[in-house]
Structure formats: C-alpha cells, structure tokens
Amino acid sequence: MSPSPVHENTEPAPLLEPPVAGSEADTLIGSLERQRRTLAWKCEGLDAAGMNTRLAPSTMTLGGLLKHLALVEDEYLTGRLLGKPLGAPWDSVDWDAEPDWEWRSAASDTPEELFALWESAVARSRAHVRRDLAEGGLDTPARREWPDGRAPSLRRMLVDLIEEYSRHVGHADLIRESVDGRVGEDPPR
C-alpha cells in the first residue's frame, strides 16, 4: 500500500517516513505516517477470518485495531483539535453503555469496510493537520480543552498519535505473524 505521488484530490502524497534532517513538523508527521503505513501493511490482504484472528488471552484483532485507530484519528484531530462533533459511525454509539464498541463491532465489518473507515479518518486528519500547520503551526491549541482547562498543542496531539500507533503496530506485528507469517518493520516501498 505505498502512496501514489498525488491523491485524486491533488493533495501531495504523505511522507513515507521522517526526513533525515527535516523540520520539527515534517519529522513528527513523517513518524506518524510511517506508523500508519506499517499498520496498513500489517492488515492488508486479509480476509475476514484473518482480520478476526486473536492471540490468547487477548481479544484484540487486526480489524479491531483498524476501527479503533479510525476512532482515535477522528477523536484527536476532529473532536479535540477542531472541537467538532464526530460523524458516523461514532455519533450513533452509546459510549457509556458500550465503551469498547469499536473493538467489538469490527468483527461484523468486512476488511474493505474497515479499511475504508480508517482511510477516510486518516484523510480527514491529514487535512486538519495541514490546515492548522498553515494557520498556526505546531503551537496551535486544541479547541477542546482537557478537563483541567489546559489545551494541548497540535505538537502534543501528534506525539500522542505517534505513541498510540506505535503501541498498536506492535500488537499488529504479533497478530499478523500468527495469521500467515508476515514479519518485518517496514512495508515495501
């Protein structure tokens, strides 16, 4: 799943990895994009059974990871950064009654549906980050404050996303290896 040089909306292709000696923004975004690419590579090409494989004792699946990270993308860079309500499917979930809905419900989704959900969340996130970088840079504060009144910067949100992806790419490594033996740190270019 290597990115094409230009997406259909004429946006530049995402970075494949952090630059060797780039700006702070390019380094953070490149690191996040590398984690996104690796997750996609670990999940691509599987049928529903592969997407629903678990390693005991965990109930985590690759499909659940894709859906969870789609939610994380939307929550961080639409909900928190922009202060906007989340759209479908997140807006119809009773999160108090089903706090792990995305993990559980992924088993009912096809691999194509899961990838489409995740890819659309990533596309929204990229657009939001581009806009906020152009308007205020990495110091742009989130529109939704933390409960203690502090507003994290875009910089902090990117670091948090990198951490979230890095943790889950490790899970994806183990699950994918158990499905068909796919191993490796980086997808082919």
Image (cartoon, grey):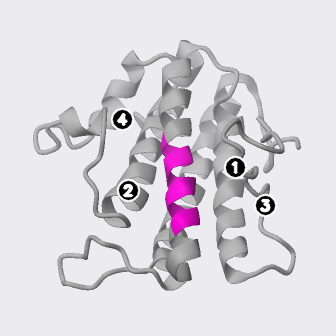
Q: Is residue 123 located in the magenta-colored stretch of the structure?
A: yes
Label annotation for residue 11: 1
Point out the stretch of residues depicted in magenta: 121-131
The quarter of the picture where the N terminus appears is: top right
Residue 125 x/y as whole percent: 51, 54
Q: Nearer the viewer, residue 47 or 170?
A: 47
Q: Name above or below for residue 145 compared with residue 118.
A: below
Q: Nearer the viewer, residue 10 or 88?
A: 10
Q: Nearer the viewer, residue 141 or 169?
A: 141
Side (left or right) of 153 relative to 98: right
Label annotation for residue 17: 3
Give the mark toward the camera: 2 or 1: 1
**Label 2 – label 3 distance at C-alpha:** 23 Å
Residue holding disc 4:
103
Q: Please state which amino acid type lies under the numbered disc 1.
A: Glu
Q: Please state which amino acid type lies under the numbered disc 4.
A: Trp
Q: Please state which amino acid type lies under the numbered disc 3.
A: Glu
For marks 2 and 1, the one nearer the N-term is 1
Residue holding disc 2:
78
For marks 3 and 1, the one nearer the N-term is 1
**Label 4 – label 1 distance at C-alpha:** 31 Å
**Label 3 – label 4 distance at C-alpha:** 28 Å
Residue 74 x/y as whole percent: 40, 50
Residue 156 x/y as whole percent: 47, 77
